[in-house]
Image: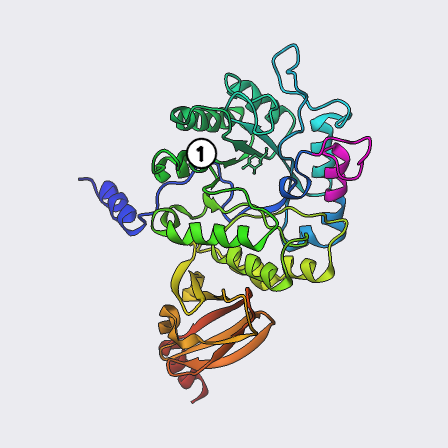
Amino acid sequence: MSKMLLLLVLLSLLNPAVEALDNGLALKPTMGWLHWERFMCNTDCDTDPDNCISERLYMQMADMMVKDGWREAGYEYVCIDDCWPSHERDAQGRLQPDPKRFPGGIKKLADYVHSKGLKLGIYADVGEKTCAGYPGSLGYYETDAQTFADWDVDLLKFDGCNLKWTLLGDGYIKMSKALNKTGRSILYSCEWPLYEWPFQTPNYTAIRETCNHWRNFNDVFDSWISIKSILDWTASHQDSIVPSAGPGGWNDPDMLVIGNFGLSHDQQESQMALWAIMAAPLLMSNDLRDICPRSKELLQNRRIIEISQDPLGKQGYRSAKGNSFEVWERPLSKNRLAVAVLNLQEIGGPRGFAISGVAGWKVCDPQCNVTLILPEYKEMGVQTKESKLILKVNPSGTALLTVTPISKDFGRIHWKDTD
Ligand code: GLA
């Protein structure tokens, strides 16, 4: 074996993570806005012009993203979901937007979004029709990929409705290649495993090689039951899905519904904290023109966003469960750790949780620094293995914190310096 080959083998042993789709995108979980959960398939621009799926909606969201600090916080993609196209392809077989709702066309919308320093996402489907019954891409993968590239689109959400499940893999892979062939960098968001799970365990190695993120489970709704079901599904499948996440490819537990109607503030904090722990894409689906200040502050909380975007790119997992608490941990760069403690008891008041019991607390040997991020920011100072820190967690709320080890070496160097 040549030295080079030996080196490569050694390197691959050191880094067993499966290969990601090599398009240079989604090195950190995608951040942006996606219309579906909040605006769904509202095409009635006559009676509901402010909320219908039209170019105006995305232009207004792009305006808000710049004006209200979203772009600065890291939210970058403005994404169209289902119901944008006309029911007919054009004479050349290309998808076209509904002419009444998108009079300027998608290219012009992309130019507008780009002029704001943002990126535009679009939606299509691997099968014969989209989930809402608009034309699907089956038989048109190359045409549609080229159309999106010609329009200067930056992201494609590719749904999995209306296709025999045995053809899903082939379809998703073909579209991935078609996008690549256009030469334009288009982030590729898939729903391949979601549609495959009912029939067989998806091949996450192939999925990671094909997509930049992938939905595994049901659509998110604006309710605590929905958030809990997503967390439960994720935790109970974590052994098969967590290892496949990393720079370039992420598990997608669906949109953030923070700022809508269904979640209490504590529940919104839980969604934000756990989506950061899960290294999930942070795609908000809400109305940025009308959002309460507390939800906005939460979505723009830079300490939580820092956890989400941590350069180590490891997805967190549920490490303990009991007494109606769940502990989730995410390893961070520089040997740091993020810990979320979720109180699932939906009766009574705040309950205490002794943090030193969590598995990752070993990074506090001999000492660590603890920063509480939720429910409020607070430097908890230097702690040790024996510290008796008690967190107070509200019903259906989450305490989120980071733990930073203080190394022995640092202590010694420090001594010498001050000697
Ligand atoms: C599916 C997807 C949703 C959304 C709708 C649109 O249900 O999972 O995220 O895109 O289709 O019809």
- The spot of residue 268 in percent (x, y) is 61, 59
Task: Report ligand 1 position as a quadrant.
Answer: top right
Q: Is residue 77 left or right of residue 311?
A: right
* In the image, farthest residue toward the top: 91
154 or 205, which is in the foreground?
205
Residue 279, can we see it?
no
247 or 164, which is in the foreground?
164
Q: Is residue 327 left or right of residue 67?
A: left
Question: Any magenta on residue 45?
Answer: yes
Image quadrant assignment for residue 326: bottom left
Q: Residue at x 70, y 62 (%)?
A: 294
Q: Is residue 223 left or right of residue 251?
A: right
- The spot of residue 47 in percent (x, y) is 82, 33
330 or 230, which is in the foreground?
230
Residue 45, can we see it?
yes
Image quadrant assignment for residue 360: bottom left
- The spot of residue 332 in percent (x, y) is 44, 61
Q: Residue at x 67, y 28 (%)?
A: 84
Is the residue 361 above or below the residue 223 in the image? below
Q: Residue at x 46, y 66 (%)?
A: 339
- The spot of residue 88 in percent (x, y) is 65, 16
The residue singled out by tag 1 in the image is 195
Which stretch did the figure color magenta?
A: 42-62
Question: Any magenta on residue 320?
Answer: no
Q: Is residue 130 left or right of residue 173?
A: right
Label 1 environment density (alpha carbons within 10 Å; few <14, some 14–19, many ≥20) = many
Looking at the picture, which amino acid does disc 1 mark? Tyr
